Amino acid sequence: MTKRTEVSPGNPNPNRPVLASHFVRALARIHRRRAGQPLPSRRAVIRCAGRIRRAAYASMAVAASPRRAWSRAVLRSLRGRASARLLGGRRVAEPAGKKIRVVSPKPSENEGNQEDELRRLVPGGRMMEFCSLLEETGHYIQCLTAQVLLMQRIADSMSG
């Protein structure tokens, strides 16, 4: 027998409470780091915005099923950033010899590239079959929508 869980009509995403708890905890950690410091500079504000963005993506990926390729890809990329930061942010310098000229494709060449564009937009979608890509895209959009609603509610509760 398989056990089915019912989702109430008011909550189309059963992972929304999990997403909210992960995101709020991450925001609290970011806020704790900043507490007691003088007014932040422009650079500090930009860094804080990046931390919030990474926290939002991480909480969304953790709240999603680990079976989802896009959530694994997001977590892998965030872990890669963390390990690069631990290594001192060293990057391999590119040779300054040749400059690459970017030429935009003609409209006739671009018509068949919608699938490739979708693969580029969905994390982890580069090597997927098309049907799997569409399924992952639907779930990714659903999670992004839940994330936007959560952030709007947090902003509304903080402002009023």
Image: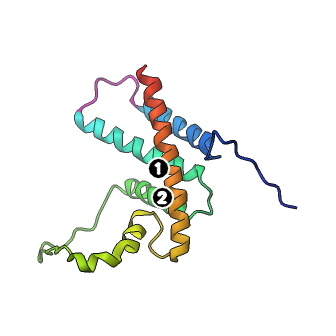
Residue visible at 70% across and 46% down? 7
Expressed as whole percent of the image width and height from the top left, the position of residue 123 reads 45, 63
Part of the protein shown in magenta: 34-41
Examine the rendered structure and indicate whether residue 13 appears above or below residue 114: above
Can residue 70 be seen in the rendering of this structure? no
Expressed as whole percent of the image width and height from the top left, the position of residue 99 reads 12, 74
Residue visible at 43% across and 30% down? 155
Which kind of residue does numbered mark 2 sit on? Answer: Val
Q: Are marks 2 and 1 in contact (CB under 8 Å)?
A: yes
Q: Which residue is mark 1?
A: 57
Left or right for 79, reference 64: left
Residue visible at 56% across and 65% down? 135
Expressed as whole percent of the image width and height from the top left, the position of residue 133 reads 51, 70
Q: Which residue is mark 2?
A: 74
Q: CA distance from mark 2 to mark 1?
A: 7 Å
> Could you classify mark 2 by the number of other residues whose Cα lies within 10 Å: few (under 14), some (14-19), or many (20 or more)?
many
Q: Earlier in the sequence, mark 2 or mark 1?
A: 1
Residue visible at 62% across and 42% down? 18
> Could you classify mark 1 by the number of other residues whose Cα lies within 10 Å: few (under 14), some (14-19), or many (20 or more)?
many
Which kind of residue does numbered mark 1 sit on? Answer: Tyr
**SS for tag 2?**
helix
Examine the rendered structure and indicate whether residue 159 appears above or below residue 117: above
In the picture, the quarter occupied by the N terminus is bottom right
In the picture, the quarter occupied by the C terminus is top left
How many labels sit on residues? 2
